[in-house]
Image: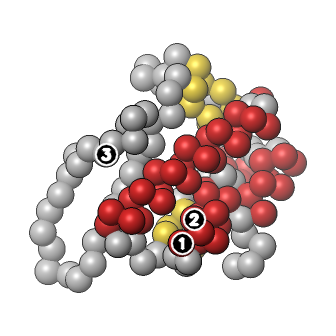
């Protein structure tokens, strides 16, 4: 949530050790995307290539704050960054601060539609993988 709180939408017991946490960060009115589409919950949907540097940094920092909070609250031991463009930067910053290792899964439009700026930022987060 924009106020930093979290809401559990699904929880279930399994016979396996550990857990997986999926988070969907509230980003405010702007949703950065790779391919433009309509999303009724966002008043401003913007392709990442059209975002300003400060908007990209705000997006990254918002995600960093959420992942750091979840890591502390849930005793996270590894981060799975589920796209190749901005999430490796988020995961790298969290790793640098908290020492939590991460892995990145590139897939789909995050590879196909990224421009030089967003790919440069993505590679910053993947340098030491």
Per the image, label 1 sits on a secondary structure element best described as: helix
Instruction: Please tell me how crowded label 1 is: few (under 14), some (14-19), or many (20+) other residues with Cα within 10 Å.
Output: few
For the point 48% across and 60% down, the residue is 68
**Above/below status of 25 relative to 100:** above
For the point 70% across and 40% down, the residue is 56
Q: Which residue is the site of mark 1?
A: 98
Query: x%, y% of residue 84?
Result: 66, 59
Residue 81 relative to residue 54: left or right: left
Quarter occupied by the N terminus: top left
**Above/below status of 129 relative to 114:** below
Query: x%, y% of residue 67?
Result: 47, 57
Label annotation for residue 94: 2
Residue found at the far top of this picture: 43
Marks 1 and 2: CB-CB under 8 Å? yes
- The quadrant holding residue 90 is bottom right
Q: Which residue is the site of mark 3?
A: 6
Q: What is the C-alpha distance between the residues marked 1 and 2?
A: 6 Å
For the question of whether residue 47 can be seen, the reply is yes
For the point 18% across and 57% down, the residue is 11
- Sequence order check: which comes first, mark 3 or mark 1? 3
Q: What is the C-alpha distance between the residues marked 3 and 1?
A: 20 Å
- The quadrant holding residue 44 is top right
For the point 52% across and 22% down, the residue is 29
Per the image, label 2 sits on a secondary structure element best described as: helix
């Amino acid at each position: 949530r924009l106020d930093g709180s979290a809401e559990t939408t699904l929880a279930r017991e399994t016979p396996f050790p550990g857990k997986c946490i999926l988070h969907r960060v509230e980003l405010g009115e702007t949703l950065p995307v790779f391919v433009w589409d309509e999303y009724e919950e966002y008043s401003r949907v913007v392709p990442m290539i059209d975002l300003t540097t400060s908007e990209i940094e705000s997006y990254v920092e918002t995600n960093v704050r959420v992942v750091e909070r979840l890591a502390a609250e849930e005793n996270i031991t590894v981060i799975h960054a589920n796209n190749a463009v901005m999430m490796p930067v988020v995961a790298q910053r969290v790793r640098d601060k908290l020492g939590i290792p991460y892995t990145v899964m590139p897939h789909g439009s995050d590879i196909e539609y990224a421009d030089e700026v967003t790919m440069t930022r993505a590679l910053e987060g993947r340098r030491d993988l």
